Image (cartoon, grey):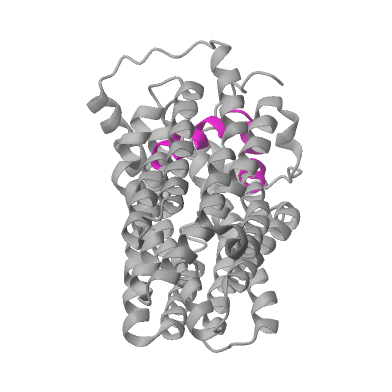
Amino acid sequence: MSNPSTSVPRSPAAAAPAATARRKVPLTRPLRHKRYRNIWLANMVSNLGTWIQTFASAWLVASMTQSASITSMVQTATYVPVFLFALLAGVVADAVHRPKFLFFCNLYLALCATAMALLVTTGLVSSNAVLAITFCLGIGTAFVWPAWQAAMSGLVDPDEVEAAATLNNLSYNLSAIIGPALGGLLFGWIGASALFLANALSFAGLLGVYWAWWQERTPQATVRESFTQRFRLGMRTAFGCARYRRILRNVCSVFFATIAFAGLLPVFVRDVLHKQSSTYGLLMGCLGGGAVIAAFFLPQVRARVDKTGVLVGALLVYGLMLVTMASTRSLALLVPLIVCGGMAWSATVSTLNAAAQLSFPAEVRARTLSIYLFVMSGGYVAGSLFWGQVADYWGVQAALGAAGACVLANALILATGNRKYPI
């Protein structure tokens, strides 16, 4: 269908019976909506560029410093802007014409990626410069995420939102397989500059889709409240819901622990495995590969198990992955291990994300999602800084083991309160 769905997700209370029924929605069903399908495909290409840049930035910094904490700051620089600007971005996203807003945000991201490529080409690159431009990219991401998630969930029917969240995760993780593997092969051949330029070019499809949507001049709801009123309403709505507060607590604690994998993997490959960029790309791709596999059986699992049960199982698998990584150097074991971790990661992210998207009606969705992103990025920022310091003092394997123990503790706490406090 060419126009966004006008269906509005129900309130948490109304959504509960539907969640209890857990009717299976086929994974590909949201793709029947033309606009969702076009954005999903263009976003997959953009995700490929993002993963190439993520790989190149992390390995470039790891090759310029021996410090685990500085290397992990690539993740910090990515998520600090989300933490700083997510709440503002949510208020803005509920008040602007979203296609126009998303067009200019993605144009800004493309220009930042181009600036990174020029910096490397001119030989002026340093770890601080990479972190600075990564921070600038993070600002753009902070403003894109609330508007994009609110727009995407409005393009499908309410009962398709969870399947759409899984599809979005599938798109992201298909790119997570190809991007790091491609980056690992090409980094030493064509250099980081070309990889950053590839990311800049990857935004072309999204810019085209958003431009076409913008030109349709679809009516926009009139915003009568002031910025302060909209902000206060979003905060009251989100924190006034006990279920949403539970989601936010889980998001903060889960992402605090799980960021250890992304933040410390370059150091693990360099210092523990004593391998090069191609191995780093391979292991990053394994996580994405597991997430892709998960996308095809998650609908069947969700038809039989409630959200809390899915999340507990996923956290148990991911925590065991981190704990096992702390005690092995065998690539033959690490590859299937991280694939299993990727399956668990897909279940974790899509479950929490769909629960957040379905919690409130469309008119406040971007604001409430921005609070979700604020809490998520806060967990990421604190975690990347903390685990980097732990790795510097006690070693990367000890940091991964401790992070795994934290994930397992989250699973235990969630399982204990499953009946009384469901997600």
Q: Is residue 146 above or below residue 300?
A: above
Is residue 245 in sight in this rendering? no
Work out which residue is located at the far left of the displayed protein and give it: 228
* Nearer to us in this view, 13 or 234: 234
Residue 209 position, x and y percent, is 61, 26
Apparent side of residue 130 relative to residue 206 in the rendered image (left or right): left
Kindly identify the residue that appears in the image at 44 percent across and 37 percent down.
Answer: 111
Q: How many marks?
A: 0
Task: State the quadrant of the N terminus.
Answer: top right
Q: Is residue 408 visible?
A: yes
Q: Quadrant of residue 72?
A: bottom left
Residue closest to the eye, 106 or 94: 106
Q: Residue 193, how many percent across, how many down?
A: 51, 52
Residue 36 location in percent, x, y?
65, 31
**Magenta highlight on residue 163:** yes
Q: Which of the 4 image quarters holds residue 160?
A: top right
Q: Is residue 229 above or below residue 316?
A: above
Question: Looking at the picture, how far across and down is residue 373, in whole percent?
Answer: 40, 47
Image position of 263 with respect to 150: above or below? below
**Front-most of 395 and 129?**
129
Q: Residue at x 65, y 69 (%)?
A: 282
Chief secondary structure of the magenta span?
helix
User: Compared with residue 99, is residue 239 higher up or lower down, i.e. above or below?
Assistant: below
Report the side of 391 relative to 10 (left or right): left
- Stretch in magenta: 142-167
User: Is residue 179 part of the magenta span, yes or no?
Assistant: no
Identify the residue at image location x=51%, y=85%. Answer: 272
Q: Nearer the viewer, residue 54 or 38?
A: 54
